[in-house]
Structures are given as C-alpha cells and as structure tokens.
C-alpha cells in the first residue's frame, strides 16, 4: 500500500486524529505490517503526481544502503538510473525517497509489465555495473506490482 501526503503537517494530523481508529477497525485483516515514511528527494522523469490511471504496474525497490555509500548511491540514482528510466518507452513517472537509517525507496510507474520488462532485460545489468550498485546496497527488496484500479482512492 502506498500513501502520498501533500505535506508533513497533513500526515501528522492524520496520525494524531484518525489513524488509531482506522487501524483498530482493521484488526485481524493483516499480519506483519510495517510502515515507513519516506521523504521525497527527487522525481524520476517528470514531476511526480500520485495518479495511477495512466499506469498498469509499479516497480518498487526498497534499498538499505551502506552508510559510507549513501552520497554515491543518491548521486547514481540521479545521474545514471533516473535518466535511463526516463528514456525508456512505457515509463510514466516515478520518485526517489529517503527514510532515516540509510533507507531509500525508488518507485517507478509503467504503462505495462511488458514495457517494464523491456527496460529490465536491455539495461539493468549494464546500468548496475556503471552505477556500482552492488557496492552501495546492503539489502534490496522490491517487486513489480500490478495496479488494481478499484483499490485506488
């Protein structure tokens, strides 16, 4: 689940006034839930908007980066990965976010899984070597998620 907040003040207000009531109503409907708050660092391709009507899939990568490699990792996202994704047909938009503890989120929206697959097959290995991603990343989790339009609010 992804939630996008216009400002930190709106997020804090929701957490103070509504979160606990909503969470208690959902008790027992999920297990092992974790929530992370990422601050927007920069857009991928164009100005990010949390609009999902023009995308069928989202690729999410949750990265924990070695402390001494954070600056390099962020620079490579901006200078290597971002332009490569932005130049890929079928890539709609995305964002790069940061959380405390050297954690980052790369979220990219794609017109289809097939379009994302073309980018992945053609470029990921070469880009990873160029960006020295293996040296930066301590842990990586992620997936390609098919969007369900009826779940979008």
Image (cartoon, rainbow, N blue to C red):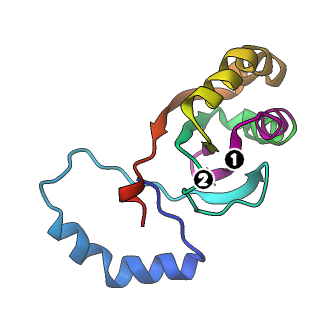
Q: Dot 1, how many residues are within 10 Å of its Cα: few (below 14), some (14-19), or many (20+)?
A: many
The answer to whether the residue labelled 2 contacts the one labelled 1, judged by CB atoms less than 8 Å apart, is: yes
Q: Quadrant of residue 77?
A: top right
Label total for image: 2
Q: Nearer the viewer, residue 35 or 115?
A: 115
On the image, numbered disc 2 is attached to which residue? 54
On the image, numbered disc 1 is attached to which residue? 92
Q: Nearer the viewer, residue 141 or 2?
A: 2
Decide if residue 34 is on the left or right side of residue 112: left
Compared with 56, 149 (above or below) is below
Q: Of the residues under marks 2 and 1, which one precedes in the sequence? A: 2
Q: Nearer the viewer, mark 2 or mark 1?
A: 2
94 in magenta: yes
Q: Quadrant of residue 88?
A: top right
Residue at the spot x=55%, y=57% of the render? Answer: 53
Compared with 59, 10 (above or below) is below
Compared with 43, 26 (above or below) is below
Residue 64 visible here: yes
Q: CA distance from mark 2 to mark 1?
A: 8 Å
40 in magenta: no
Q: Residue 136: horizontal and vertical position, in percent? A: 70, 27
Q: Residue 153: horizontal and vertical position, in percent? A: 42, 67
Region rendered in magenta: 80-107
Q: Dot 2, how many residues are within 10 Å of its Cα: few (below 14), some (14-19), or many (20+)?
A: few
Residue positioned most to the left: 28
Residue at the spot x=87%, y=38% of the render? Answer: 79
Circle 1: element type = strand
Circle 2: element type = loop
Q: Quadrant of residue 42?
A: bottom right
Q: Residue 29: horizontal and vertical position, in percent? A: 16, 53
């Amino acid at each position: 689940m992804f939630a996008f907040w216009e400002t930190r003040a709106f997020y804090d207000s929701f957490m103070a006034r509504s979160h606990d009531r909503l969470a208690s109503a959902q008790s027992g409907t999920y297990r092992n839930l974790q929530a992370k708050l990422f601050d927007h660092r920069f857009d991928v391709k164009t100005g990010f908007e949390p609009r999902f009507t023009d995308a069928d899939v989202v690729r999410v990568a949750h990265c924990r980066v070695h402390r001494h490699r954070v600056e390099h990792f962020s620079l490579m996202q901006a200078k290597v990965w971002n332009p490569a994704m932005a130049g890929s047909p079928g890539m709609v938009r995305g964002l790069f976010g940061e959380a405390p503890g050297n954690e980052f989120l790369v979220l990219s929206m794609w017109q289809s899984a097939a379009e994302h697959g073309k980018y992945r097959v053609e470029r990921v290995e070469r880009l990873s070597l160029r960006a020295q991603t293996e040296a930066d990343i301590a842990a990586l989790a992620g997936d390609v998620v098919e969007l369900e339009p009826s779940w979008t609010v």
